[in-house]
Amino acid sequence: MTEMLALSQERTQLFHDLIDNKIPKRVPVNAMFAHEFAIQYAGQDLTEAQWDVNGLEPIFNKTCQDFYSDLLPVSAFRLPSFYKILGSRNFVMGSSGFLQHPEVEGLAIEDYDAFIASPFDCIVEKVLPKLYSKLDTDSATKAMVMAKAFKAFNDDMGNVGRIYGNLIQNFGYGFVNLFSGFCEAPFDFLSDQLRGFKNISIDVRRVPDKVEAAVEAVTPWMIKMGTPPDPSPYNATFIPLHMAPYLRGKDFNRLYWPTFKRTVEGLKANGMRSFLFVEHDWMRYLDYLAELPEGTVMMFEYGDPKLVKEKLGKKHIIGGFYPVSLLKTGTKEQCIDKAKELIDILAPGGRYFFSFDKVIITLDSANVENTKAVLDYVAENANY
Amino acid sequence: MNSKYYKSWEEYKAENPEITEKQEKVMAPKIQTYEEMMFGFIMFLCV
């Protein structure tokens, strides 16, 4: 057995123990860096490097070499080729090379009924031409544009997947994929790119029946979207949670929670665990999260880790809370002390993995020396 | 899954009755994979 394979098996075991509710040998470390960070860290130009996907391998290699993680720490979720071909309005490259997400309206208010009748048909016929200007044309041109974009998407994602495989092998990362699938809470799906933040905030007050019918209609499609072809209890479907902290309790109860819960339960029934990025502050909803299927993975951005451990720590798998902002502003000692504090609260009894409160997306988000020091500290000291 | 643009293999087969049982074994996984890939792409464009 090669040294890297042995390392990979050891790291896989850390996460399998975490998932199987056994105390692992050490707190597993899941560092996460976006491709934009990796490109900037490698000293490359963001506006150019994202177009040359094969060139991402040495770029990712450098991040993997310098930052400790038990799972592959780099990922490229959005690449510009297919967005450019499609004339994207929802993801547009800024002058820095970062793909920005402007507020958009993919679904007009008068199209709610079409969406409720058939979400996927409405997306194809009405939403895509609003989000992507090159699809707002005659059917023959649209077909050509779509074919080019689909080819670009699959080429880029295929190449990125090949690079991931090489990195996992070369650096001995664990064979656990917390991003094996992707979907959204139905309300977030309706809000993010379809109605937009501003419109949905009005809709919940003016047309709540339409919103409720729309999230009901799209729930089976979210479950389908989040179920990969090869479900595994050791992998997960990633679900970033967006709108709940901005809703009134009664709107959350009616419009957000029921279909989100059914989505997570539906994924579980299909053999998939959910990995929730609990964005912003969900402290008032902890009792709801406690109702989700046992062993749901939750990475918290903000909140009280003691309360989360108390309410959710025996049932679910918890990570996050470590503020990336501290990596930017704190001293090395302060940064390591924060890691110790979180480990003392969250590690006892297991069901905890170390991660920052969010993916590090750009080089100026954090001080790299502090980041390295914290990851190394946890990997070397957080033993059970 | 009510849609004009997404079809299960059973729906596809019903529209293409010329497909024999022998052909189905090799065709079904391939055709359905492309169906799922396009579905995944379209949904990705909305998140």
Image (tube, coloured by chain):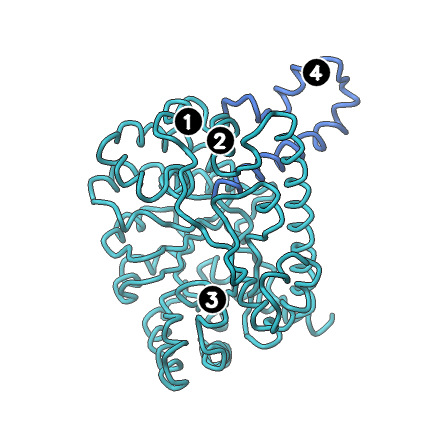
Chain colours: A cyan, B blue
Pick the front one: A235 or A10: A235
- Mark carried by residue A115: 1
Query: Which amino acid is tagged 2?
Result: Ile
Q: How many marks?
A: 4
Neighbour tally class for label 2: few under 14, some 14-19, many 20 plus, Cα within 10 Å = many
Question: How crowded is the residue under tag 4: few (<14 C-alpha within 10 Å), some, or many (20+)?
Answer: few
Q: Dots 2 and 3: beta carbons under 8 Å?
A: no
Residue A12 in view: no
Q: Nearer the viewer, residue A315 or A204?
A: A204
Q: Is there one chain holding both mark 4 and mark 2?
A: no
Instruction: Look at label 4 and name its amino acid.
Output: Asn
Label 4, secondary structure: give it: loop
Q: Mark 1 near mark 2, Cβ–Cβ under 8 Å?
A: yes
Extreme residue toward the top, this view: B17
Determine the secondary structure under disc 3.
Answer: loop
Tags 1 and 3 on a common chain:
yes
Residue at point 28% right, 57% down? A281
In the rendered structure, which amino acid carries the disc numbered 1? Phe
Q: Which image quadrant is residue A106 in?
A: top left
* Dot 1 or dot 2, earlier in sequence: 1
Rendered image: mark on residue A356: none
For the residues marked 4 and 2, what is the alpha-carbon distance in whole angstroms? Answer: 26 Å
* Chain label for disc 3: A
Judge whether residue A72 can be spotted in this image: yes
Identify which residue is drawn at 67% across, 39% down: A148
Mark 3 highlights which residue? A360
Q: Are marks 4 and 2 in contact (CB under 8 Å)?
A: no
- As measured in the structure, the alpha-carbon distance from the residue carrying label 3 to the one carrying label 4 is 49 Å
User: Residue at (59%, 25%) from the top-left corner?
Assistant: A138
